[in-house]
Image (cartoon, grey):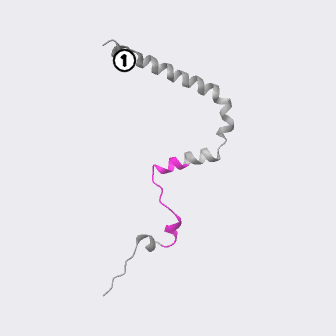
Amino acid sequence: MQAGITFSENALGAKAADHRPIFHIAKPIQELQQIIEEGDWDERLPYYEKYINRFSWGVIIASVIFLAPVCINIFTR
């Protein structure tokens, strides 16, 4: 008496081999990848560079103001 082994990917037919499951986390990553590969963000970047630099300096200054008391407290002990 022999029993046949049926694998789930063979039971669903050829369509299962062509279509891989997309998890909920992977879909936004794939959308971001598509934007990076097909978008024109690299051509528009020089226009927004001034604003990006100002925002970055603001984040740096805010972090220095936030962490300065902690560093002063550590060094005065």
State whether residue 33 is above or below residue 15.
Answer: above
Say whether residue 65 is left or right of residue 36: left
Residue 17 within the magenta-colored segment of the rendering: yes
Q: How many marks?
A: 1
Say whether residue 61 is left or right of residue 38: left
Which quadrant of the rendered structure holds the N terminus?
Answer: bottom left
In the rendered image, which residue does mark 1 sit on? 70
Which quadrant of the rendered structure holds the C terminus?
Answer: top left
Q: Position of residue 60 (x, y in %)?
A: 50, 22
Magenta stretch: give its range. 13-30
Nearer-the-camera pick, 40 or 65: 65
Q: Position of residue 34 (x, y in %)?
A: 59, 48
Label 1 residue SS? helix
State whether residue 68 is above or below residue 15.
Answer: above
Residue located farthest toward the bottom when viewing the structure as drawn: 1
Mark 1, residues whose alpha carbon is within 10 Å: few (<14), some, or many (≥20)? few
State whether residue 15 is above or below residue 21.
Answer: below
- Residue drawn at point x = 64 percent, y = 25 percent: 50
- Residue drawn at point x = 60 percent, y = 44 percent: 36
- Residue drawn at point x = 64 percent, y = 39 percent: 41
- Residue drawn at point x = 50 percent, y = 68 percent: 17
Q: Position of residue 66 (x, y in %)?
A: 42, 19
Amino acid type at image mark 1:
Val
Residue 74 within the magenta-colored segment of the rendering: no
Q: Position of residue 35 (x, y in %)?
A: 60, 45
